[in-house]
Image (cartoon, rainbow, N blue to C red):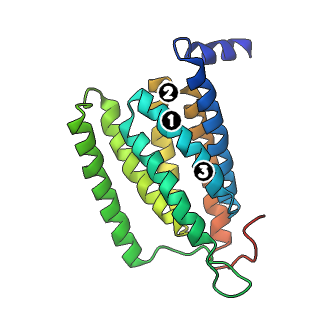
Amino acid sequence: MSLIFDWLFAQYENTPNHIVVLELISVFFALLSVIYSKRENILVFPTGIIGTGIAVYILLVYGLLGDMLINAYYFIMSIVGWYQWTRKVDDNHYIPVTITTAKEKKWSFLLFLGTIVFVTLVYGVTDRFDTWTAYTDILTTAIFFVGMWLMAKKKLENWLYWIVGDIITVPLYLYKGLIFSAILYFVLTIIAIFGYLAWKNHLNKSPQTLLR
C-alpha cells in the first residue's frame, strides 16, 4: 500500500502544494455532485458549482483549455439546472426524468458540432496544438457539453454522454499527471452507469422532493 501512495504522490513532486490541495477539494465536490445527481437530489448543483469553480483555475494552469471551458460551462449550466429542476408540474411534484425528444437530439448534435468548432478555434488562436491531448480534449469537451445540457434538462441520456466522456478522460489525465482527477473519472464512470440505471427506473415519475 505504501508503494502505491509513494507512486501516487511522486506524480506531484514538482506541483505546488496549493494546486494539490485544490485538486483534492475539487475532486471531493465533483464526486459529491455526481452522487447527488444519481439520486435526483438538488444538491447536485451547489456541490457542482464549488467543484467546477476550482477546476477552472487548475485546468487553466495545466493548459487544458477545453476542459477549462467546459468547467466554466458547467458552472453556468449548474445555475440553469438548479432553476429547471425546481420547476413543478403541479403543487406537489417536480419535473420528472424524461427521454430526449427528436428536437432535443438535433440540438444535441448541433451543440456537439458547435463545441468542436469553438474549442478548435480557441486552441488554434492560442497556438496549443502541440500534442495529441489537444484533440482528445476537444472531443471530450464536446461530449461533456451535450451531457451537461441534457442533465440540466433532466434527460435520461445525459448519463450515456458522461460514461463515454469519462472513459476517454481517464487516460488523458493520467498522461497529464493529474492522478487524483484520473481516479475520480474512473469512479465517475462507475457511478454514471448506476446513475443511468437509477434514472431509467425513475423515468416519467415526478418526485415530491428534491432532497433525498
Name which residue type carries label 3. Gly
Name which residue type carries label 1. Val
The residue at the point 27 percent across, 50 percent down is 118
| First of labels 2, 3 by sequence position | 3
Is residue 102 rendered to the left or right of residue 91? left
Q: Nearer the viewer, residue 108 or 94?
A: 94
The relative height of residue 149 versus residue 3 in the rendered view (above or below) is below
The residue at the point 69 percent across, 58 percent down is 43
Residue occupied by mark 1: 170
Q: Residues within 10 Å of mark 2 (few under 14, many from 20)?
A: some
Q: Residues within 10 Å of mark 1 (few under 14, many from 20)?
A: many
Residue 136 appears in the figure = yes
Asked which quadrant contains residue 194, the reply is bottom right
Q: Are the two marked residues, 2 and 1, in contact with CB atoms closer than 8 angstroms?
A: yes
Q: Are the two marked residues, 3 and 1, in contact with CB atoms closer than 8 angstroms?
A: no
Q: Which mark is residue 174?
A: 2
The residues bearing labels 2 and 1 have C-alpha atoms spaced at a distance of: 6 Å
Is residue 142 rendered to the left or right of residue 35? left
Is residue 23 rendered to the left or right of residue 201? left
The residue at the point 21 percent across, 38 percent down is 125
* Quarter in which the C terminus is drawn: bottom right
Q: Secondary structure at mark 2?
A: helix
The relative height of residue 34 versus residue 23 in the rendered view (above or below) is below
Residue 15 placement (x, y as % from top left): 53, 17
Mark nearest the camera among 2 and 3 is: 3
The relative height of residue 84 versus residue 197 in the rendered view (above or below) is below
| First of labels 3, 1 by sequence position | 3
Q: Nearer the viewer, residue 161 or 126?
A: 126
Q: Which mark is residue 48?
A: 3
